[in-house]
């Protein structure tokens, strides 16, 4: 895992399911959190609720193309400084010029080696500078979670966490008060349905909530996933 990958959340926008899923799997192995969108409309909806550190967008998509989506990203206050990497199957000079003129940070012509994509992503994120990682600890009522030590305590007493629970809680804490997509929390190699995440959330609620059936801190965001709302 590169230093640039730590806690970085990428959005991959491509209408080709095979390519999108391959990119997601590869970038996850590189240490990134990755969310996918099959078209520009889906990408817009995700960006309304989630924050991304970089957007990888295919130019040739049905309906709204990648150029139009890039222009929308740049014209939106919340994402105007979010880096954009354009993928193009054509690789023509005019396409490169148009993409860069719209504010894209880089481009890559298909077909490409995934290793080159990873290097370009890392370079863009390094230029963007370090990400604010948030507080060292979060307070959850009577519970307190240390993001560096991955330790949970309640009323001053240690509470045992599995490695998966600790990593899940850290991921949610780094995006505190913002919804995190359920499937982006799922392990890379198992259970693409997200069921394992649901089980871990249930267990975490028993450890941090006064009333696990009516959670105050680890909330479900319908249609998206989960959100941690510390004090």
Image: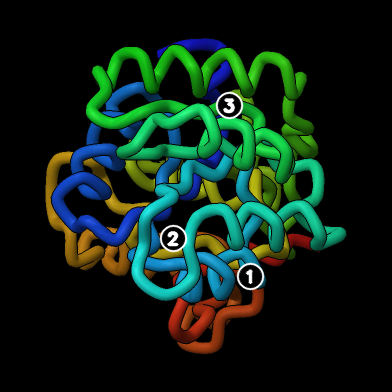
Q: Position of residue 204 (x, y in %)?
A: 44, 60
How far, Cα to Cα, is label 3 from label 1? Answer: 25 Å
Q: Residue 203: x, y in percent?
A: 36, 63
Q: Is residue 160 left or right of residue 110?
A: right
Report which residue position mark 1 lands on.
49
Q: Secondary structure at mark 3?
A: strand
* Residue 157, numbered label: none
Instruction: Indicate the secondary structure of the residue bearing disc 2.
Output: helix
Instruction: Point out residue 10 in the picture as x, y percentages from the top left corner.
Output: 50, 42
Say left or right for 19 vs 49: left
Please tell me which residue is depicted at 40% across the width and 19% down the height of the picture: 118
Residue 65, horizontal then vertical, whole percent: 48, 62
User: In whole angstroms, how far apart are the C-alphas of marks 2 and 3?
Assistant: 40 Å
Earlier in the chain: of badge 2 and badge 3, it is 3
The residue where tag 2 is placed is: 204
- Residue under circle 3? 106
Badge 2: how crowded within 10 Å, few (<14), some, or many (20+)? some
Local packing at callout 3 (Cα closer than 10 Å; few below 14, some 14-19, many 20+) is: some
Q: Is residue 231 visible?
A: yes
Labelled pair 3, 1 in contact (Cβ < 8 Å): no
Give me the residue at 63% from left, 53% from top.
70
- Residue at far right of view: 77
- The quadrant of the rendering that contains the C terminus is bottom right
Relative to 161, residue 178 above or below: below
The reply to whether discs 2 and 3 touch (Cβ–Cβ < 8 Å) is: no
Relative to 211, say whether 77 is above or below. above
Please give the name of the residue rendered at 25% of the width and 64% of the height, measured from the top-left corner.
194
Please, is residue 193 above or below residue 11 in the view? below
Residues packed near mark 1 inside 10 Å, few (<14), some (14 to 19) or many (20 plus):
few
The residues bearing labels 2 and 1 have C-alpha atoms spaced at a distance of: 23 Å
């Amino acid at each position: 895992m590169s230093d640039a990958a730590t806690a970085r959340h990428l959005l991959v926008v491509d209408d080709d399911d095979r390519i999108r899923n391959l990119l997601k799997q590869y970038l996850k192995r590189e240490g990134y959190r990755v969310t996918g969108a099959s078209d520009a409309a889906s990408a817009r909806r995700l960006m309304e609720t989630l924050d991304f550190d970089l957007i990888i967008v295919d130019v040739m998509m049905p309906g709204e193309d990648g150029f139009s989506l890039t222009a929308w990203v740049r014209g939106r206050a919340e994402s105007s400084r979010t880096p954009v990497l354009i993928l193009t199957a054509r690789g023509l000079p005019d396409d490169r010029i148009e993409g860069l003129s719209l504010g894209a940070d880089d481009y890559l012509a298909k077909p490409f080696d995934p290793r080159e994509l990873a290097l370009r992503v890392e370079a863009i994120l390094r230029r963007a500078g370090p990400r604010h990682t948030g507080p060292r600890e979060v307070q959850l009522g009577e519970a307190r979670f240390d993001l560096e030590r991955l330790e949970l305590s309640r009323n001053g007493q240690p509470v045992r966490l599995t490695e998966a629970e600790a990593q899940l809680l850290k991921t949610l804490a780094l995006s505190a008060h913002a919804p995190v997509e359920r499937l982006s929390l799922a392990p890379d190699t198992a259970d693409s349905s997200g069921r394992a995440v649901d089980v871990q959330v249930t267990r975490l609620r028993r450890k941090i909530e006064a009333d696990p059936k009516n959670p105050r801190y680890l909330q479900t965001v319908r249609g998206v996933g989960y959100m941690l709302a510390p004090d």
